[in-house]
Image (tube, rainbow, N blue to C red):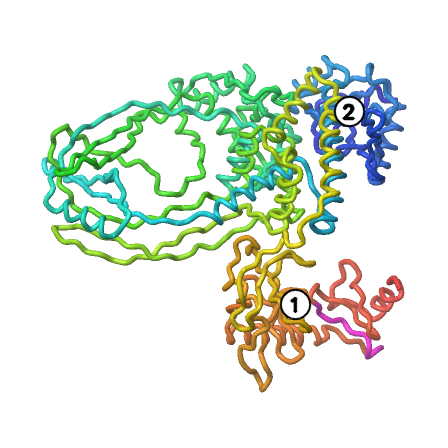
Amino acid sequence: MQDNLVIVESPAKAKTIEKFLGKNFIVKSSFGHIRDLSKKDLGIDIEHSYTPSYEIPSDKKKVVEELSKLSKQVETVWLASDEDREGEAIAWHLTEVLGLPVDQTRRIVFHEITKTAILNAIETPRTVDMNLVNAQQARRVLDRLVGFELSPILWKKVRPALSAGRVQSVAVRLIVEREREIINFKTTSSYRVTAQFFSPSDPDKVLFRAEYQQRFKTREEALEMLGRCRDAEFTVESTEIKPVKRYPAPPFTTSTLQQEAGRKYGMSVAQTMSIAQKLYEQGLITYMRTDSVNLSSLAIAKCREEITALFGEKYSSAHNYTTKSKGAQEAHEAIRPTYIDRREIEGTAAEKRIYDLIWKRTVASQMVAADIDRTTISIHMSGSDVRFTASGDTLRFDGFLRLYSESTEDDGEQNEQAVLPHLEAGEALKAQEISATERFSMPPMRYNEALLVKRLEELGIGRPSTYAPTISTIISRGYVDKSSRPAHKRAYTQITLRGGNITEKQLTENYGAEKNRLAPTDIGMVVNDYLENHFSSIMDYNFTANVEKEFDRIAEGELKWNKMIDDFYRPFHTLVNAAIETQEPKNSQVRVLGTDPASGHTVKARIGRYGPMVEIEAAEGEKPRYASMKKGQLIESITLDEALELFSLPRTVGKLDGEDVVIGIGRFGAYVRHGSLFASLAKGDDPYTLSYDRAVELIHAQERQKQLANTPLRTFAEDAELTVKNGRYGAYIAWKGKNYRLPKGAKVEELTYEECMKTISQSKK
């Protein structure tokens, strides 16, 4: 009989912990939650203090049976699920299901999987913290109540099969509001004047760039300005050198790791968390769900050793960062390597990248600030009250920048500070060239995952464990689309004064390219508007943030969880009943775009049975015409011309061998049709602009594929009807009009007649 059973959440964690404990311990995994709210009806008894009804899902019954059997065979059960509220709830569910007394069962927590941490946890066990359990229960119950009551209303009032969630709906609202800012944004242009100056007294004639501190609205104003520059004199009015210190960023929290991995490596929030989870379970980093920026004194001491060994003592400076947010979800430390002296790890390329990022960020946080000289030169132009200004940074001491620099959303743009020559006040300058360049105002950027997490955190919405599932949910529900957009081209004017001559040229630039940005879909916008109209309190950012604070108060034992639910649910249920009774205007989700010039009928955009669409109304007795909208088009922003273009399909682009070549869109996507042959368009092909030559290319490719599929790879003398053919998913057996999979691991050239017939006889009818 074993003395001890340790139950953890994941098999990988079990494997790592087992190495640290002796033969008297058996370590098993619960594979996450073993119980959840009943899927039958609401799963909550509203009349009896919102008591939850839990059930063991069918896929967990085998795990529970095994754990139950083992728990009866050992002297002591140790519950070692994660140290946050979810982990505490898993521990409590285990006590309930396995029949363990909650006030006697040993609960152990650790925020790193190292031998020291595990043995220390075994020596200092506690019992299950019911305050943390109740905070998790409150979140789960509240979210079930919101989803259960809101979703049927959306089915009835907006469209079937929709769902709503408390935090998810607020995240969608942020994305919808940003999209509307972009839709309503009006681009304006102005002329930015820059000059390349040098000092005649400088033997090297070093050029430096300065910008005029006024912009001009029109080309004429810019021309007039350059005309004044012809005979103007330029002198240094002042030179200011200001020493500044740039301090390292604190160690990673969950959200800052998600943001930095997104900026540096383009990783999604879910990807980052999945990799961090693996690193944690292998014992390589501390717990990856944390609001804390604190480091243990041992970690700070180890960082000092590493920094001194790598760069010398002058680079080391201990910092103990403090966490600003209240209720930093039961976390003890920031995300850091468990062993600071381990600079590299074995693993996948992604695991190595994330580990390297965490290691550098942790160690850099304990390094000295970088010393920078920020130089600003103000240049007077005769006959003008406005100055030219040049600014630049000189790095005097690199400090933490020697190891790591935090990236920003602007990285990759021309934002480097130039190094400026030493100039004295009163010194005369010459302008080699002065240019007035047309620049355009830019709409706000769409959120990417990292920016959305940052905004949610700023608003106090969600917690470390909720960011990844929130974003995954709004994308999978089809409320938000994560996509990249190609750059557009536009012309701009540049006017240049050089050697007394003014020249003007037209140039082009790319703008508006986006990578992995979040944009609302039409259905996302419609659902958002409906919820804002009828459930404004649920959609309010402050309200959602206050709910999080209430969960924190429950976790701290200051508030009873079912009272908090009751205070929320009663007014919410009143809103639900009012929304059910309210009749929605029939055309509330329809946008009239204008009139079709060909028929004179109204063109409108709306949500149809299969998604967003445009419609040309018909005269009495005739049928209206419909067309699906392209990906990325929105009901709110589509123009009449864009809508009319959607009715151009199907279109005939020419003839091939006497038959029409037709391009259209069907239920399986865009296609080219030639006679009875259909060929799908490739990923980059646009059915509205596809050329005749490209259409013929796709037809020939489809013909070759069809020919290949119909040519047997094998025939058999024993039976002419038995063949092995090549299909779109690989080789298969064909016999008497029916198809069969090849035996596992079989090679086509080695297949015998007997093996084929055996496979056919054993296949399910």
Please state which amino acid type lies under the numbered disc 1. Answer: Gly
Magenta region, main secondary structure = strand
Q: Which residues are magenta?
A: 718-727
- Image quadrant holding the C terminus, namely bottom right
Q: Which residue in the protein does label 1 denote? A: 666
Element at label 2: helix
Image: 126 above or below 598: above
Element at label 1: strand
Q: Earlier in the sequence, mark 2 or mark 1?
A: 2
Q: Which circle marks residue 91 in the picture?
A: 2
User: Quick check: can you spot residue 515?
Assistant: yes
Judge from the rendering whether residue 60 lies leftward or rightward of residue 342; answer left or right.
right
In-front residue for pair 713/665: 665
In the image, residue 242 lies at what x, y percent?
27, 24
Judge from the rendering whether residue 614 lies leftward or rightward of residue 576; answer left or right.
left
Is mark 2 in CB contact (under 8 Å) with mark 1? no
In-front residue for pair 289/305: 289
Residue at horizontal 84 percent and vertical 39 percent from the top: 41
Neighbour tally class for label 2: few under 14, some 14-19, many 20 plus, Cα within 10 Å: many
Q: Which circle marks residue 130 in the picture?
A: none
Q: CA distance from mark 2 to mark 1?
A: 52 Å
Please state which amino acid type lies under the numbered disc 2. Answer: Ala
In the image, residue 734 lies at what x, y percent?
79, 71
- Mark 2 or mark 1, whichever is nearer to me: 1
In the image, residue 695 lies at what x, y percent?
55, 74
